[in-house]
Structure formats: structure tokens, C-alpha cells
Image (cartoon, rainbow, N blue to C red):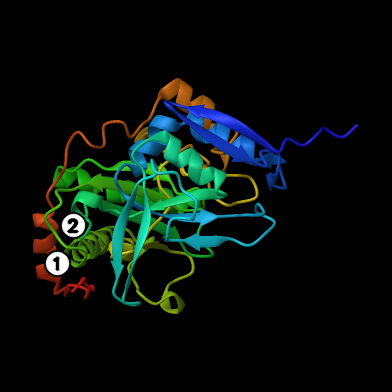
Amino acid sequence: MAKPQTSAVEIEVGDRVVRVTNPDRVYFPETGWTKHDLVDYYLAVGDGIVRALRERPCMLHRFPDGLAGPKVHQKRLPGGAPDWVQTVELWFPRFGRTADELCVTELAQVIWAVQMSTVEFHPWNSRRAHVERPDEWRIDLDPMPDADFAEVRRVAHVAHDVLDELGITGYPKTSGGKGFHIYVRIEPEWSFGEVRRAALAFAREVERRCDDATTVWWRKDRDPEKIFVDFNQNARDHTIACAYSVRGTPTGTVSTPVFWDELDDLDPRDFTLASVPSRFADLGDLHAGIDDESFRIDQLLEWADRDGIEPAKTGKRP
């Protein structure tokens, strides 16, 4: 006999109660995981997802009908939000208008976003107290079509070596796809253009040291077996899935923090909505110390001057 469908459940999240409608709706057809399973996942990694999103403008990747339906990239907060869901106003010069984006300060806001069919969370690398001054430098290792994770590993190790030489701590994580991310907390003193310029200088240093890496801008011109060190993820209004974000993949892979000494043996496909909660329960948040220290990018900007890298143009609110 078919299992009866539940129209709604109420989830206690701290001092809040979040009403989740259609909890039995299948979001991941390949595995059968439901909206309720997604809620349970984010509750299980609550400290980690809130730390990754805290005070950051956040674009939502929503799947109103599950992965079988279309994906909605949503900057503006969905309608009907309770008054405890916080936002930050952003200016988009290309369109000449503003938008109020979700700004997470507590776990109930994450669960409310899941109720609104959010699967993936893509925050800015700045916080609402200094929206135009990033405090997070993102190193995104993006494999080209014919590259495999062995090449990703080699480039990641070189990036780690360069960070060590700079005296900078990088926090690694899988992307939830085929790539790899390294996050660095920086002082919020520089514009997006300056941080992007520093990121390009770093990427070129990695490229000089590792034949598997490339900084070639146009995708059509890149070697299909190389790893693009995507410095442009530090540009204004560019976002990538945060730590502990589920990805909209058939197997529900998760962008998962890892130890550096796991890199040589890990398979990113092993980190899923089903497996990460037990890992989190055993190890805690491997990015728990990310806010304990922030770094300066002066040396990278000196490298940018050396390499003749010009700042990118970024729009500012008039």
C-alpha cells in the first residue's frame, strides 16, 4: 500500500517553528530523497551551514518541483518571508536597481529557505557590514572536460604550498562537483577589483609552478586537460556553493570541508546528503576556526604589480 502523503509538518529550529509544506515531495528522483530529507540534512549540519552563510548576502538555487523540474536562480528574497528572516539590500549597476537578498544569521532562516524549495546556497564573499569589501578570498579549481581529480589534487597541493609560503591558512573543501575550493579569510580592506587582482596574481604563481594549472581566460582557448584556477570567482556578485551546501546533482553531492591530508585519497562523490551528517557528527565543522584569523593580501598585490595585472572594473552604487 502506498505511504500516505503529509501535507505539512512543523519543525522546531531553536526558538522558531518553521512550517514545511509537501515534505514528502521527492527532490532527488534517482535516490528518492525528499524535501523532508533535505530539511533533516541541513538541521544535522546546522552549525556548519550557518557559519558558512553568516551575515552574507545569499543567492538561492531553488527547485520548486525537485531536480526533475527547472532550477530558479533567485537573488531577491522569495515572498511571504516571516519577519525574522533577515536580508541585506544590494545594488546591481548592470540593471540599475536594488534587491533584498537573504542574509542568514540563524539556522531557522536556512530551513525556511529549504521550505521555499532551496537546495543550494550561494553566498557572496563579503558580509552585510561591508558589502563592497570582501572578507573571503576564494580559490576555485575548475577542471576542464578531459581533466580528472588527479590533476585537481596536484594543483591543490601546489596552491597549498604557495599559501604556506605566504603564511596564509587556507580552508579546503570539495565543490560538490568535480572541482575543489580553498577559502581564506582576509581583512575587509580591499574592493572586489583588488581582491580579484590579487587572486589572479596567486593563480598565475600556481600556473608557473604546476603544468596542470591554467589561467587562460577564454574557455575555448584552454587546454581541455588542465585545471582552471578561476580567479574571477572573486569578482563582485560572483557566487559559488558554500561549505555544506547540497548541490543539485542526481546523487545529492555536498560541498564538504576536508582535511588537507585527506586530499590524496578522497573521492568527492562520497560526500552526499546521506553521508555528510555522520561525518559532521564525528568530526564537527572542519571550518570551525576559519574566522579566528584573517590575512592581508599586500604580497599578492605586489605580485600583481610585478605581473602588470590591472584592476577589474566594478560597478558602484551612485
Q: Position of residue 308 (x, y in %)?
A: 13, 74
- Pair 1/2: label in front: 2
Q: Earlier in the sequence, mark 1 or mark 2?
A: 2
Q: Position of residue 159 (x, y in %)?
A: 29, 50
The residue drawn where x is 20% and y is 63% is: 201
Work out whether residue 318 or residue 257 is closer to the camera in this orientation and state it.
318
Cα–Cα span, label 1 and label 2:
19 Å
127 relative to 206, above or below: above
* Residue type highlighted by circle 1: Ala
| Direction from residue 203 to residue 154 in the image, left or right | right
Quadrant in the rendering for residue 16: top left
| Direction from residue 271 to residue 132 in the image, left or right | left
Q: Quadrant of the N terminus?
A: top right
The residue drawn where x is 77% and y is 37% is: 5
The residue drawn where x is 29% and y is 45% is: 55
Residue 304, disc: 1
Q: Position of residue 200 (x, y in %)?
A: 24, 65
Quadrant in the rendering for residue 185: top left
Residue 133, disc: 2
Residue pushed farthest top?
Answer: 282
| Direction from residue 10 to residue 316 in the image, left or right | left
* Residue type highlighted by circle 2: Arg
